Image (spheres, rainbow, N blue to C red):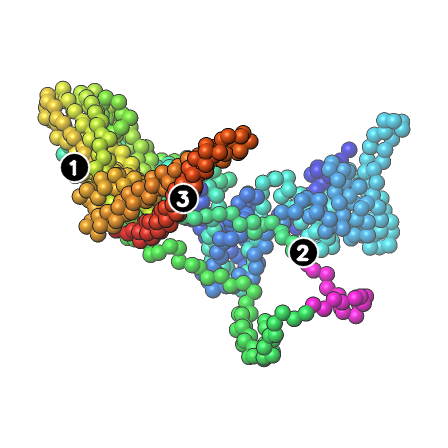
């Protein structure tokens, strides 16, 4: 039994390889810190050959947005094609035949009956048109077996002949178009079987060989930095290594490799995914059925000059200039800037890398060609140079009782030092490890690498005192500005027989330092430097102050509190006068309210007495012989009414007076400003 996947497949493909493609090896690789790699390929392409590059599916969007193609021989790029990301079933629908998985060769030949074919049987060749093909099966119905496969041709001589495919040495389709379709079909299936592979094809015009160069970006593994710091007192040195991982599907052989410190902006744009827009349905007016129309009234009249949004009533803009007629012509863009390629590498036991600034980025260019096999990694030296460093101690909040051994490293290498781990060696011995952020040329970093048990630091914090700095008032609100003091005392004890320099790092928060002056400040801390004698102690007292703001509504203040405020020396003379007026008016308002309350109480008392007199008079009028008592009560009632009238008049006058004082007070508060 012969399957289509057997060696008989070569019968149909004797014209050559499935997809001839020129080889454009990788010549240059630049790796970035955000997981993007820049690649350059170059090579010579013979006339008529196409260039094919294979990429992972996930890389296609980056390739399509960044690909640049140039021809050093002056040829023109006529087009760039790439495999669709449609499903295999969608891609195979364009072909006039289908090939089932594991099906017999005779089944495929029968499916293309009518095609011209040449077969080799023994030493003879036969040419004709396929009439059909079949598998000969024998045995019972439930267990039939294929014994042979037969092909029937209508020969060019006019005769029809059967051939056993087991005796056919080779087959060849004579229809070039059908042959090409079969090759493309098989290539499509092969590409789909690779699952994660897509191809890009570059076509170009012109006779003769072409010298092509292609550049693009794709996602790659992020390169890493690793340093060794030697704290030799006479000759401190820093050695830097770049750790590079080749996770691509091909070797990097003798490539020019660069690594870039910095994170340029990068994103994914879905250029590889077909997009379909929603189109509106348009129809002619006469195709629509007539219906009722509701016309609204005009809100305002528009001018009768031109038509908004068109060219009627105005001058039409000139048409855009015609674009060049070339299909596609690429020009190579200068990458970044003119790099300092001629800068000599640093001479040391390992050869480092030259560097050049790329705007806000920095590029390390390795001196010689680099080879990294696929799925392998490499450590490449990019720095070995003298560096400015001094040994000291660092103590900061949260470090406990002991500071850490450290070095103050100043970057005098003229290169940006990418962030990474640092292994520290002191007089040739391993001393500890640290981690540093990226810092540029001329900048410096503190590198802490081990705990120093020979130094003890005790911290004492005192604070809470508030000092009034200034007072302001506006819109009826007084604002008090205080300075809250905090004093932190560090007592440092050194039990080692050598003097030490200690950097105390204290969180800044919202405080500012009054004394002493810090040697430097970070984004969130102050740093102070202290010299500690051998076998001795030293004290550092840091005095800080922060601003506190409090507000007081003048309407809620009492006259006595305002008088106390007036006596404060931080208030201006104009402010004192205004506050004195407000205090006097508040006192008048309080006195007026007290008088008014007393008059209201007197009015209520007189009214209650009137009610009692009237009740007594009414009771005595029902009893004979009480006329004198009734007259006494009536006389007292008349006097009460006179007094009540006077009290009411006084109450009304006091009410009016109080309102006037309140009006003056409100105006004075509204005008208060200093």
Number of marks present in the image shown: 3
Q: Secondary structure at mark 2?
A: loop
Where residue 428 sits: x, y (%)? 21, 27
- Quadrant of the rendered structure where residue 372 is? top left
Whether residue 566 appears in this view of the structure is yes
Q: Is residue 285 magenta?
A: yes
Give, as a single range, the part of the protein colored magenta: 278-296
What residue did someone put label 3 on?
642
Rendered view: 38 above or below 560: below
Residue in the foreground of this view, choosing between 111 and 655: 655
What residue did someone put label 2 on?
278
Residue in the foreground of this view, choosing between 451 and 515: 515
Q: Which residue is located at x 70 percent, y 51 percent?
A: 181
What residue did someone put label 1 on?
515
Whether residue 41 appears in this view of the structure is no
Q: Which residue is located at x 76 percent, y 37 percent?
A: 103
Earlier in the chain: of badge 3 and badge 2, it is 2
């Amino acid at each position: 039994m012969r399957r289509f996947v057997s060696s008989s497949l070569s019968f149909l493909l004797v014209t050559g390889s499935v997809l001839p493609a020129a080889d454009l090896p990788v010549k240059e690789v630049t790796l970035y810190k955000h997981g993007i790699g820049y690649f350059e390929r170059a090579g010579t392409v013979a006339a008529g050959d196409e260039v094919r590059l294979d990429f992972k599916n996930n890389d296609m969007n980056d390739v399509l947005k960044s690909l640049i193609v140039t021809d050093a021989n002056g040829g023109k790029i006529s087009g760039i094609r790439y495999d669709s990301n449609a499903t295999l079933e969608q891609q195979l629908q364009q072909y006039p035949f289908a090939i089932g998985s594991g099906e017999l060769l005779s089944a495929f030949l029968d499916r293309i009956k009518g095609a011209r074919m040449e077969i080799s049987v023994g030493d003879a060749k036969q040419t004709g048109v396929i009439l059909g093909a079949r598998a000969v099966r024998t045995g019972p119905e439930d267990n039939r077996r294929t014994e042979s496969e037969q092909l029937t041709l209508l020969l060019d001589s006019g005769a029809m002949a059967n051939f056993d495919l087991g005796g056919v040495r080779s087959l060849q389709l004579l229809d070039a178009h059908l042959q090409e379709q079969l090759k493309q079909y098989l290539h499509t299936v092969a590409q789909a079987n690779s699952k994660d592979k897509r191809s890009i094809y570059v076509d170009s015009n012109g006779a003769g060989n072409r010298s092509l160069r292609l550049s693009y970006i794709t996602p790659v593994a992020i390169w890493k930095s690793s340093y060794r710091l030697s704290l030799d007192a006479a000759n401190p040195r820093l050695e830097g290594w770049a750790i590079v991982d080749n996770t691509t599907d091909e070797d990097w052989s003798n490539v020019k490799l660069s690594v870039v410190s910095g994170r340029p902006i990068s994103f994914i744009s879905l250029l590889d995914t077909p997009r379909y827009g929603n189109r509106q349905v348009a129809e002619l007016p006469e195709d629509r059925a007539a219906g009722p129309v509701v016309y609204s009234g005009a809100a305002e009249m528009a001018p009768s000059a031109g038509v908004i949004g068109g060219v009627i009533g105005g001058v039409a803009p000139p048409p855009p200039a015609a674009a060049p007629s070339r299909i596609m012509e690429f020009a190579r863009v200068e990458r970044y800037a003119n790099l300092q390629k001629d800068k000599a590498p640093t001479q040391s036991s390992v050869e480092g890398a030259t560097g050049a600034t790329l705007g806000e980025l920095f590029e390390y260019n390795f001196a010689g060609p680099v080879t990294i096999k696929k799925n392998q990694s490499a450590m490449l030296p990019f720095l070995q140079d003298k560096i400015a460093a001094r040994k000291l101690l660092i103590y900061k909040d949260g470090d406990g009782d002991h500071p850490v051994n450290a070095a103050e490293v100043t970057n005098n290498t003229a290169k940006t030092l990418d962030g990474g781990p640092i292994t520290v060696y002191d007089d040739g011995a391993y001393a500890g490890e640290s981690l540093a952020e990226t810092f540029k040329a001329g900048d410096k970093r503190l590198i802490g690498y081990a705990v120093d048990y020979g130094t003890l630091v005790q911290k004492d914090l005192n604070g809470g005192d508030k000092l009034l700095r200034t007072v302001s008032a506006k819109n009826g609100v007084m604002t008090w500005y205080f300075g809250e003091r905090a004093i932190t005392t560090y007592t440092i004890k050194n039990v080692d027989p050598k003097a030490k320099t200690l950097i105390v790092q204290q969180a800044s928060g919202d405080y500012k330092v009054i004394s002493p002056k810090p040697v430097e400040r970070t984004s969130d801390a102050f740093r102070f430097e202290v010299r500690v004698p051998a076998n001795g102690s030293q004290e550092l007292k840091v005095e800080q102050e922060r601003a506190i703001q409090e507000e007081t509504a003048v309407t809620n203040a009492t006259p006595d509190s305002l008088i106390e405020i007036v006596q404060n020396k931080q208030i201006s003379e104009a402010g004192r006068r205004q506050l004195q007026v407000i205090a006097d008016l508040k006192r008048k308002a309080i006195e007026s309210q007290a008088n008014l309350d007393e008059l209201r109480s007197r009015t209520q008392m007189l009214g209650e007495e009137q009610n009692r007199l009237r009740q007594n008079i009414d009771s005595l009028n029902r009893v004979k012989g009480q006329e004198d008592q009734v007259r006494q009560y009536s006389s007292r009632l008349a006097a009460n009414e006179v007094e009540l009238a006077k009290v009411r008049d006084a109450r009304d006058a006091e009410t009016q007076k109080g309102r006037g004082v309140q009006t003056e007070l409100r105006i004075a508060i509204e005008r208060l400003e200093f």
